[in-house]
Image (spheres, rainbow, N blue to C red):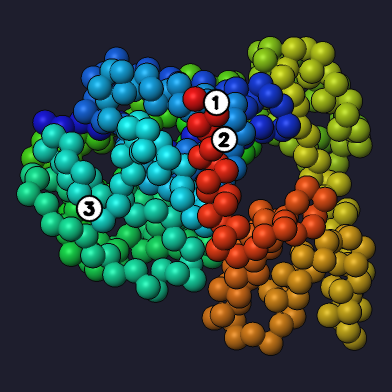
């Protein structure tokens, strides 16, 4: 039997709510995963992408990650991973550097044998580049095979217009027959059996948004003739969610009483208000929660959102009404360009998504290659990319 710990979306370095405590929480969750892997004696840790939250993590985050990877190496637990959309760089990836240091195996089209399992990897691939994929992998002679990838796969992720891949199509197009697909990117755990192959998301290890209400955790996947997937939870920072529909005459006291029903110490508080009750300044609720010991509090008043989105539309010229509202919002030049592509361009509907993605990628690359003051760096093009990669590795060498 071969057993691997399937994790992903650790988002190291994410300073959620601009709080250093939340940044530490994401590292602590990753440390717990590694401790569990060692205690459980798994054959490997498989990471399905978005190890880091940002493609240029701070030195603090790199050192924290390296400490965990070294702990796993000392315990003789291999760490295998693919690159996610948050951390992908145009040239060499951080996983390549960690691989050179002997701490990580970056998964790809060639099999990596772990016990009775051949593991393959498919990094995150932008929509515009997916048509070029051939899903050709090197053969293996193991009893089982698993593909580790990062992306939103149908049918496990509800299709709200952002699903990128169809898992059944990937399995059918591959020249290797996989027993399992171990996925990352979707932060909610999920699993399904597709044409005899188990496809599963492990979920994130910390809550990266208020929508992630279920407990965080990871998967244990056993290969022993059949594939068995079990879920293990992680003890992460407590989030308190309070949703209230205020009746007429109800106000702050009602919210305060509901909050007092919960243990607020060191928790992240999310309050959502609706109904016909009194208007409450969000700062009053946030101050109460923080004075009660909460780490931070966030308030969403849906009534205010409805008021803000009320637009006086002239049906004689609805497009002009939309343009006027957009002017009032005060979008940046970049945002206005994207809005024009999505809403008002003459591009065929089938090409709008690709064109929008191209614009966003261009803006991100422009931002990545700009100086802090917004100006372009002295050197451009491939030479600049190579220089950046060399600087990244040189910086790591100075501190390791």
* Residue 135 rendering spot, x and y as whole percentages: 27, 65
Q: Residue at position x 82%, y 50% from top?
A: 373
- Does residue 316 appear in the picture of this structure? yes
Residue at the location (71% across, 82% down)?
A: 345
**Mark 3 or 1: the one toward you:** 1
Residue 61 location, quadrant? top right
- Could you tell me which secondary element the residue under label 3 belongs to? loop
The residue lying at 36 percent from left, 38 percent from top is 100
Q: Is residue 140 left or right of residue 82?
A: left
- The secondary structure type at the circle numbered 2 is helix
Quadrant position of residue 346: bottom right
Residue matched to label 2: 395
> Which residue carries the number 3 mark?
110
Q: CA distance from mark 2 to mark 1?
A: 7 Å
Quadrant, the N terminus: top left
- Secondary structure state at the residue bearing disc 1: helix
Between residue 308 and residue 228, name the one nearer to us.
Answer: 228
Quadrant hosting residue 282: top right
Return the mark for residue 399: 1
Q: Position of residue 109 (x, y in %)?
A: 26, 56
Camera-side mark, 2 or 3: 2
Front one among 281 and 16: 16
Dots 2, 1 in contact, CB < 8 A: yes
Q: Using the rendered image of the protein, determine whether residue 219 is visible from the camera's viewpoint.
A: no
């Amino acid at each position: 039997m071969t057993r691997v710990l399937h994790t992903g979306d650790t988002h190291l370095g994410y300073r959620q709510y601009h709080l250093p405590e939340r940044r530490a929480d994401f590292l602590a969750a990753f440390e717990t995963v590694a401790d569990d892997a060692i205690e459980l004696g798994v054959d490997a840790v498989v990471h399905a992408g978005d190890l880091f939250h940002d493609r240029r993590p701070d030195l603090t985050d790199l050192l924290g990650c390296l400490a965990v990877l070294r702990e796993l190496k000392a315990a003789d637990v291999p760490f295998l991973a693919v690159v996610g959309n948050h951390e992908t760089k145009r040239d060499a990836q951080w996983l390549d550097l960690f691989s050179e240091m002997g701490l990580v195996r970056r998964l790809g089209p060639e099999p990596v044998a772990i016990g009775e399992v051949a593991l393959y990897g498919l990094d995150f691939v932008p929509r515009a580049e997916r048509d070029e994929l051939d899903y050709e992998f090197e053969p293996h002679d193991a009893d089982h095979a698993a593909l580790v990838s990062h992306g939103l796969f149908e049918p496990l992720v509800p299709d709200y217009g952002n699903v990128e891949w169809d898992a059944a199509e990937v399995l059918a197009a591959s020249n290797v027959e996989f027993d399992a697909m171990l996925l990352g990117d979707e932060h909610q755990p999920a699993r399904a059996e597709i044409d005899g192959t188990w496809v599963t998301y492990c979920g994130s290890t910390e809550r990266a948004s208020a929508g992630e209400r279920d407990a965080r955790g990871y998967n244990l996947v056993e290969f022993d003739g059949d594939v068995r997937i079990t879920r293990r939870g992680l003890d992460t920072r407590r989030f308190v969610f309070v949703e209230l529909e205020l009746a007429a005459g109800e106000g702050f006291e009602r919210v305060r009483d509901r909050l007092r029903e919960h243990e607020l110490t060191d928790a992240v508080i999310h309050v959502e208000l609706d109904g016909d009750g009194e208007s409450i300044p969000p700062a009053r609720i946030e101050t109460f929660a923080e004075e009660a010991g909460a780490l931070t509090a966030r308030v969403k008043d849906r009534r205010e959102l409805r008021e803000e989105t009320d637009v006086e539309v002239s049906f004689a010229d609805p497009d002009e009404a939309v343009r006027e509202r957009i002017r009032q919002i005060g979008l940046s030049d970049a945002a206005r360009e994207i809005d024009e592509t999505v809403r008002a361009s003459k591009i065929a509907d089938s090409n709008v998504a690709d064109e929008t993605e191209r614009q966003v990628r261009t803006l991100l690359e422009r931002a990545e290659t700009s100086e802090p003051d917004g100006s372009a760096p002295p050197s451009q093009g491939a030479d600049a990319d190579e220089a950046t990669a060399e600087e990244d590795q040189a910086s790591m060498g100075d501190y390791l």
